[in-house]
């Protein structure tokens, strides 16, 4: 089976969110990432390769391509030997499903690198679901997928009206935590082992509509207190600190 011009055109369109949604496919690149996805519940439909398939890729349809052809279909500045077309999973989530669990919520996090890192952080700390506003970056954006380092196969990302969803989780009795400059020192606060942790937009923080659902406002203090420091933490870095503190208390 050869790579056709139509194949090249189609694969390149998968850089767009609308085209990914229409086709139900996203792109993954790199030996480790593609190999991890082949062993996951996600369906790897086809692999394009400039090298022999790895053992993890055995059994998946593979198309041999030249280095020039890989350059034409790759989303990376420096293409790797493997590019896969992967099926986009369809997840469903109810507020009642989150009882007894820690869940992340993202309020318009727009940088793909930040989202990819947050998904990887969630995977590391055993958080299986992330609930996002529709304006949050698409988790199947090629840059996000690369940044997850395979965590996209284990963490379910949901897009919905976040304020409305948080109203449902509140009705289920789940506490909702969020980071604010006027919040309480996270290291001196009582933290639940279950609940929702909201992280805000890179520039604007948590929106007013979502903030109204927050029951516990937290703050990550700089050190030493009172000394000049950066204006804020990167949202992915802040997420890692917060998840680590929640898990430390568990």
Image: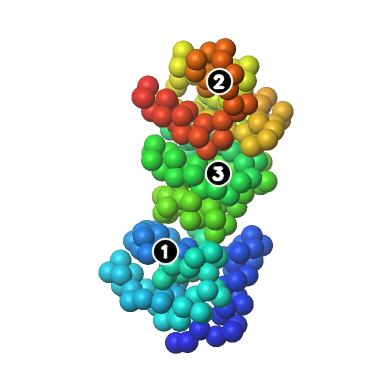
Observer-nearest of 216 and 117: 117
At numbered mark 2, what does the secondary structure look like: helix, strand or loop?
Answer: strand
Label 2 CA crowd tier, 10 Å (few <14, some 14–19, many 20+): some
| Horizontal and vertical percent position of residue 241 | 46, 29
| Residue 168 at least partly seen | no
Q: CA distance from mark 1 to mark 2?
A: 38 Å
At numbered mark 1, what does the secondary structure look like: helix, strand or loop?
Answer: loop
Q: CA distance from mark 3 to mark 1?
A: 20 Å
**The C terminus appears in which quarter of the rendering?**
top left
At 38% from the left and 40% from the top, the residue drawn is 124
| Horizontal and vertical percent position of residue 149 | 42, 52
Q: Which residue is outermost to the left?
A: 55
Mark 1 or mark 2: whose residue is earlier in sequence: 1
Which disc number belongs to residue 114?
3
Label 3 CA crowd tier, 10 Å (few <14, some 14–19, many 20+): many
**Where is mark 2, residue-wise?**
219
Q: Which residue is outermost to the right?
A: 208
Mark 2 or mark 3: whose residue is earlier in sequence: 3
At numbered mark 3, what does the secondary structure look like: helix, strand or loop?
Answer: helix
Q: From what the image shows, is residue 48 above or below residue 249?
A: below
Which disc number belongs to residue 176?
none
Q: From what the image shows, is residue 221 above or below residue 130?
A: above
Mark 3–mark 1 CB contact (< 8 Å): no
Mark 2–mark 3 CB contact (< 8 Å): no
Q: From what the image shows, is residue 221 above or below residue 95?
A: above
Q: Which residue is outermost to the front?
A: 228
| Horizontal and vertical percent position of residue 60 | 37, 73
Q: Quadrant of residue 50?
A: bottom left
Q: CA distance from mark 2 to mark 3?
A: 19 Å
At 36% from the left and 25% from the top, the residue drawn is 248
**Where is mark 1, residue-wise?**
30
**The N terminus appears in which quarter of the rendering?**
bottom left
């Amino acid at each position: 089976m050869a790579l056709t011009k139509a194949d090249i055109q189609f694969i390149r369109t998968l850089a767009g969110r609308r085209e990914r949604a229409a086709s139900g496919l996203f792109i993954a690149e790199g030996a480790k990432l593609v190999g991890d996805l082949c062993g996951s519940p996600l369906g790897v439909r086809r692999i394009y390769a400039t090298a022999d398939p790895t053992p993890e890729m055995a059994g998946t349809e593979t198309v041999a391509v030249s280095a020039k052809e890989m350059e034409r279909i790759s989303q990376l500045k420096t293409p790797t030997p493997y590019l896969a077309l992967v099926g986009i999973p369809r997840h469903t989530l109810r507020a009642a499903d989150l009882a007894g669990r820690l869940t992340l919520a993202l309020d318009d996090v727009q940088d793909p690198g930040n989202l990819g890192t947050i998904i990887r952080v969630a995977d590391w700390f055993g958080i299986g679901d992330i609930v996002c506003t529709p304006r949050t970056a698409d988790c199947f954006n090629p840059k996000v997928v690369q940044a997850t380092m395979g965590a996209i196969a284990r963490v379910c990302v949901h897009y919905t009206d976040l304020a409305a969803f948080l109203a449902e989780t509140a009705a289920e009795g789940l506490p909702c935590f969020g980071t604010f400059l006027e919040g309480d020192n996270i290291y001196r606060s009582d933290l639940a082992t279950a609940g929702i942790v909201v992280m805000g937009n890179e520039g604007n923080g948590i929106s007013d509509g979502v903030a109204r659902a927050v029951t516990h406002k937290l703050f990550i203090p700089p050190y030493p207190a009172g000394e000049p420091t950066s204006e804020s933490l990167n949202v992915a870095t802040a997420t890692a600190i917060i998840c680590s503190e929640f898990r430390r208390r568990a």
